[in-house]
């Protein structure tokens, strides 16, 4: 994404944001409440149209007018609410709206069941006992796992995860972070929105810090400390990292 701007009426939310994600890497998207993370992700997913800027995919300019366009490129977003149906089982959830049909045009249950099982196995998911289990009976971590598996089922290239460990316990967080790392190691570009610095430091390769609708910095994980990330989030800059002072200071020099 290059020079992305997005406003809602008079409210300017994204102000010339540059952002990129690479195959085989986890890029953490961090920023304070209201910094514009969700808005940026919804622009990537096509839920919001961008006002100005360039959207490039695999180096080519693309037009993304809605979620169907981003899905066709191989971009999947797992929102915080997971969008799973409690009354359906894991297979039904993973194929919801994209069910496979057999030759007589009825649901190809064996094929969907096999693919669901293979996808979970390829992600080394051990916590789900049966793909025919109702989603209502799954724990928070298992639900997250199913939502992520659903996102990678479609030969996805980019998977965006919105706060995947929020509200999870210690063991379940570790399991989901292992899965996040696994996705990148399998070659996907993973974008991880998170407020949890431990998660960010543990799994990310790059960190993109949004500050008041501007990209304060997009840096390699190995090049920043915990303190610097916090400073980028809260002040838009840290030492020689971050936005130029002129954009983060008001005319009298006070930080905005
Ligand atoms: N549909 C909308 N209409 C008007 N303003 C909006 C809309 N969506 C978001 N905003 C505003 O844009 C700003 C950025 O919101 P956004 O949800 O992108 O931030 P965020 O970084 O994801 O925050 P959080 O961490 O709290 O989820 C906020 O000030 C918000 O009020």
Image: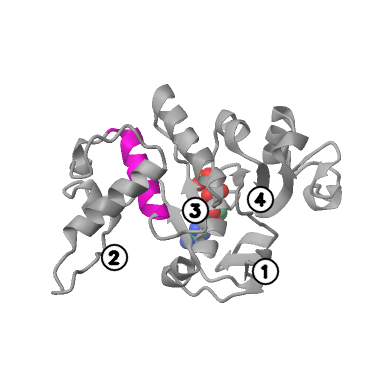
Give the alpha-carbon distance from disc 2 to disc 3, as whole Å.
18 Å
Sequence-first disc among 2 and 4 = 2
- Where is residue 89 drawn, in percent x and y? 19, 47
Left-right relation of 244 to 79: right
Q: Main secondary structure of the magenta part?
A: helix
Q: CA distance from mark 2 to mark 4?
A: 38 Å
Furthest residue toward top: 170
Q: Mark 1 = which residue? A: 59
Instruction: State the residue position of label 4.
Output: 212
- Range of magenta residues: 139-152
Local SS, label 4:
loop
User: Does the residue at mark 2 contact the one at mark 4 (Cβ under 8 Å)?
Assistant: no
Q: Name the residue located 47 percent from the left edge and 46 percent from the top edge.
A: 162
- Graded by Cα atoms within 10 Å as few (under 14), some (14 to 19) or many (20 or more), the crowding at tag 3 reads many
The residue where tag 2 is placed is: 98
Secondary structure beneath dot 3 equals strand
Label drawn at residue 226: none
Pointer 1 and pointer 2: residues touching (CB < 8 Å)?
no
**Left or right: where 221 falls relative to 44:** right
Task: Please tell me whether residue 153 is drawn above or below residue 140 in the rendered image.
Answer: below
Location of mark 3 (residue): 159
Rendering coords of residue 132 (x, y %): 18, 45
Q: CA distance from mark 3 to mark 4?
A: 24 Å
- For marks 1 and 2 on the same chain, the one whose residue lies earlier in the sequence: 1
For disc 2, the neighbor class at 10 Å (few under 14, some 14 to 19, many from 20) is few
Q: Nearer the viewer, residue 167 or 150?
A: 150
* Residue 88 percent across, percent down from the top left: 18, 50
């Amino acid at each position: 994404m290059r020079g992305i701007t997005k406003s809602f009426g008079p409210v300017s939310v994204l102000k010339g944001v540059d952002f990129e994600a690479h195959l085989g890497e986890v890029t953490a998207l961090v920023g304070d409440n209201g910094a514009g993370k969700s808005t940026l992700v919804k622009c990537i997913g096509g839920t919001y149209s961008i006002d100005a800027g360039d959207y490039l995919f695999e180096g080519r300019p693309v037009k993304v007018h809605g979620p169907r366009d981003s899905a066709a490129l191989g971009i999947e977003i797992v929102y915080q609410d997971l969008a799973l149906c409690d009354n359906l089982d894991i297979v039904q959830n993973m194929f919801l709206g994209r069910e496979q049909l057999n030759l007589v045009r009825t649901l190809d249950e064996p094929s969907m069941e096999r693919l669901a099982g293979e996808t979970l196995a390829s992600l080394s998911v051990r916590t789900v006992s049966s793909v025919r289990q109702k989603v209502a009976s799954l724990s928070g971590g298992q639900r997250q796992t199913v939502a992520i598996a659903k996102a990678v089922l479609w030969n996805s290239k980019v998977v965006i995860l919105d706060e995947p460990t929020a509200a999870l316990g210690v063991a379940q967080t570790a399991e989901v972070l292992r899965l996040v790392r696994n996705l990148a190691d399998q070659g996907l570009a993973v974008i991880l929105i998170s407020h949890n610095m431990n998660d960010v430091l543990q799994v990310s390769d790059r960190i993109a810090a949004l500050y008041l609708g501007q990209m304060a910095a997009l840096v390699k994980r190995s090049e920043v400390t915990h303190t610097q990330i916090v400073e980028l989030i809260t002040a838009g800059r840290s030492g020689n990292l971050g936005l130029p002072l002129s954009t983060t200071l008001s005319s009298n020099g006070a930080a905005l």
